[in-house]
Image (cartoon, grey):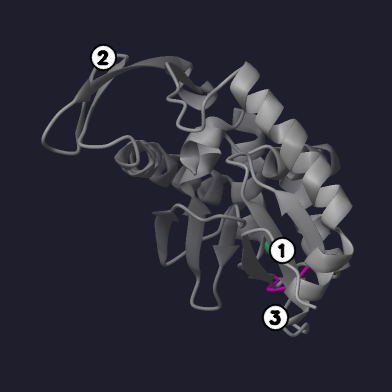
Amino acid sequence: MSQTLPHYDVRISKRAKHARLQIKPNGVLEVVLPETMNPNQAANLIRSHQDWIFKHQQSNQTKQTNHEPIYVRPNSIDLPLLKETITIKYIASDINAYEEDNDELTVSFISDMAITKILQHWLKHRATMCFSAMLFGIAQEMDESYKSVSIRLQKTRWGSCSNQRRINLNAKLLLLPEGLIRYVMVHELSHLQHLNHSAEFWQRVAEFEPDYLIQRQKLHAWSRQQPYWLY
Ligand SMILES: [Zn+2]
């Protein structure tokens, strides 16, 4: 006899070692599978965890009806690095766009669903403006040179460095405290000498970021609590 399964998304993760289930802030059930696992296993996993899913989706719904609807718009966003709090105004319009004036961001949107995309664009723009100079400064301090830097909005990675000496940074870093942004930059710049996570690599990181272990832990915590308005 077949059973109806709840709706779910499957995500294949390079980093995941085991399969896991999670319920995203918008209430959608997600199955995270390591690359080595057959995606068809997702359904089995869900079947064997129906009780867990039901319980968590229930409590998630209660939370949402009590506190916030699904399309919550942030009224303000903190940018700790820039010591700025941006207040946001929303205007229903026939275009999707944003305009920034001092510390006020005006978001014009056609539908609620466009808001996330607009805020993503804005964040990427702001991050691009300030990360290039900051990375350059830290590279000088470390006596390193890289070929290029690009700022992207990535879901799971905070940064990366290629063997072509190209550095990528996640725009979401702009929402984090300055110490964490610095740690990610020192980390990626250290990969210019060691393209791995060997003891020598961590030594290089520690030279410029002695608190790197603490920063690393904090960063992991941030990865788990992403702001709801970005998705
Ligand atoms: Zn690394």
Q: Quadrant of ligand 1?
A: bottom right
Residue at image position (63%, 48%) is 184
The range drawn in magenta is: 193-197
In the rendered image of this protein, does residue 42 appear above or below residue 49?
below
> In this rendering, would 183 be left or right of 137?
right
SS at mark 1? strand
Q: Amino acid at mark 1?
A: Val
Marks 2 and 1: CB-CB under 8 Å?
Answer: no
Q: Amino acid at mark 2?
A: Asn
Image position, residue 83 (x, y; %): 48, 16
Most foreground residue, 8 or 129: 8
Magenta run includes residue 28: no
SS at mark 3? loop
* Real-space CA distance between mark 2 and mark 1, rounded to the nearest whole angstrom: 42 Å
* Real-space CA distance between mark 1 and mark 3, rounded to the nearest whole angstrom: 9 Å
- Badge 3 is on which residue? 39
Most foreground residue, 117 or 54: 54
**Beta carbon of the mark 3 residue lies under 8 A of ligand 1:** no
In the rendered image of this protein, does residue 87 appear above or below residue 166?
above
Image position, residue 76 (x, y; %): 44, 17
Prevailing secondary structure of the magenta residues = loop
Q: Amino acid at mark 3?
A: Pro
- Badge 2 is on which residue? 102
Q: Nearer the viewer, mark 2 or mark 1?
A: 1
- Badge 1 is on which residue? 31
> In this rendering, would 7 be left or right of 79?
right
